Image (tube, helix red, strand yellow):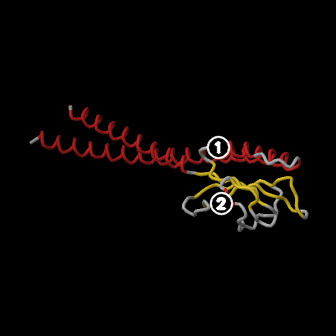
Amino acid sequence: MIIPRRRKLFVKILVLVISLSITTAGLVLTISTIEHVEVMKKDLIREGVILAKIASQSIEAGYTIRVWPFETLKQISESEYVLFLWVVKPDGTIHIATNAEMWGKRVNTTTLNTNETIVKDSFSPQGNEKIKLIIQPLNIKDSGEHWLLYLGLSLKPINNYVRKMIFGNFISFIIVIILGALVSFH
């Protein structure tokens, strides 16, 4: 009679410990993942702003000598995070784009007359992906208004990394729980 009570007590304690472990690990995983994603997004934005400034300097220099820096723009657009790069006139017309289909199209936005770098959430031109959009004013003016550089940054690589990280952590946690349960039974 004593053995069944001990066994019931042991099972209850084991279930409680496993439940607390799962809850704690879930909270820790969630919090660390959120913090890690925010750090990665901040790094992505910082790198994107640097890329936009480099591209804007190349564009401005090329404009003054009437030679567009297509090679520099191509190198920037080949980054895994860069979805597109547009040079936009003050009237909203895309003058140069990494995708030739976008040339001559108009940008629908209220940020056309800005003197500061703008970073905002947006969607890809296809509308199927949430992105970070960096708008960098260029030192090229038409009728007193700046041309702009639009740089679209994909968040897919970050999202893919997060999925892999969560899956790996989840598998590791399950293995630890199983090993802990096995050790408890012995």
Quick one: 127 or 25, which is closer to the camera?
127
Left of 135 or right of it: where is 31? left
Residue bearing mark 2: 101
Above or below, comparing residue 172 to residue 91 in the picture: above
Quick one: 158 or 6, which is closer to the camera?
158
Residue bearing mark 1: 43
Q: Residue at x 8, y 42 (%)?
A: 1
Q: Residue at x 66, y 47 (%)?
A: 77
Element type at mark 2: helix
Q: Residues within 10 Å of mark 1 (few under 14, many from 20)?
A: few
Task: List the single residue furthest toward the right.
Answer: 144
Above or below, comparing residue 185 to residue 20 in the picture: above
At label 2, the amino acid type is: Glu
Q: Residues within 10 Å of mark 2 (few under 14, many from 20)?
A: few
Residue 183: x %, y % from top left: 25, 32
Quick one: 181 or 137, which is closer to the camera?
137
Task: List the single residue furthest toward the left.
Answer: 1
Left of 120 or right of it: where is 91? right
Q: Quadrant of residue 80?
A: top right
Q: Residue at x 34, y 36 (%)?
A: 176
Left of 4 or right of it: where is 170? right
Estimate the spatial distance between the alpha carbons at disc 1 and disc 2, rounded to whole Å: 30 Å
Residue 143: x %, y % from top left: 90, 64
Q: Quadrant of residue 110?
A: bottom right
Circle on res. 76: none
Q: How many circles with numbers are drawn on the protein? A: 2
At label 1, the amino acid type is: Asp
Residue 178: x %, y % from top left: 28, 38
